[in-house]
Amino acid sequence: GWDGRTDTGTASQRRGGQPSPAVPPQGGTVIGSARCQDFRTREGRLRAARNLVKRGITNLCVIGGDGSLTGADTFRAEWGGLLAELLKTGGITAEEAQRSSHLNIVGMVGSIDNDFCGTDMTIGTDSALHRIMEIVDAITTTAQSHQRTFVLEVMGRHCGYLALITALACGADWVFIPESPPEDDWEEHLCRR
């Protein structure tokens, strides 16, 4: 997400090449970024550009899904115009505009949905599958001992990759995925099983 870029920039911290403590073993969004409505507007992107210029940041590595990567592409396309507007309104100096005249962006797909073509597995998918299987392992004994049916819902929005791979890995009797909606009488068929 772009949330930390549109505020006053207090979320930005210079690490000086040192690794952030305790980040590698954690999954998910550990740096506090989030979806940002402000970044969807030109005014929000203008504030983000000013915050980056003031901190001398001209290189970004954007790890995210459709929203983050689309935002990065829009930001890249508007960069020159954003700098020109900031210079015109006095938001930055001519020296800062010159120093920040080019924005380098690397985009990496980080989405547990695993719905990006051209890659086998997106960043976050393996961690999500691991966590899901931990949950399956935890509830399987209870389901067997009580002879109950358990329903497990996983994330994935419009992509059934996590649900399908989980179903294959744990031997589920049923899996519902958006790419192949169930037939109308699926409830009766499920009860007969």
Image (cartoon, rainbow, N blue to C red):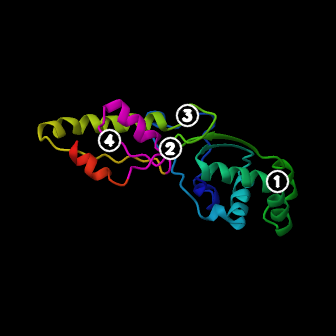
The foreground one among 124 and 167 is 167
Judge by depth and name the residue closer to the eye, 149 or 22.
149
Q: Which residue is mark 4?
A: 174
Write the residue at 26% across / 34% down.
137
User: Which of the marked residues, 4 or 2, is nearer the chain's N terminus?
Assistant: 2
Q: CA distance from mark 4 to mark 3?
A: 43 Å
Q: Nearer the viewer, residue 181 or 108?
A: 181
Marks 4 and 2, how far apart in space? Answer: 20 Å
Q: Write down the quadrant of residue 16 in the picture.
A: top right
Residue shown at 70% from the left, 61% from the top:
45
Q: Which disc number belongs to residue 19?
A: 3
x and y, in percent, of residue 99 in the image = 83, 48
Magenta residues (range)? 158-183
**Distance between mark 1 and mark 4 Cα atoms:** 59 Å
Lateral position of residue 35 relative to residue 79, left or right: left
Q: Quadrant for the C terminus, please.
A: top left
Report helix, strand or loop for mark 2: loop
Q: Earlier in the sequence, mark 4 or mark 3?
A: 3
The answer to whether 154 appears left or right of 43 in the picture is left
Closer mark to the observer between disc 4 and disc 2 = 4
Tag 2 residue: 113
Name which of mark 1 and mark 2 comes first in the sequence. Answer: 1
Name the residue tied to disc 1. Answer: 96
Whole-Å distance between the Cαs marked 3 and 1?
28 Å
Q: Residue at x 59, y 64 (%)?
A: 37
| Crowd around label 2: few <14 · some 14–19 · many ≥20 (10 Å) | many
Residue type indicated by callout 3: Pro
Give the mark nearer the N terminus: 2 vs 3: 3
Mark 1 → mark 2, Cα distance in angstroms: 39 Å
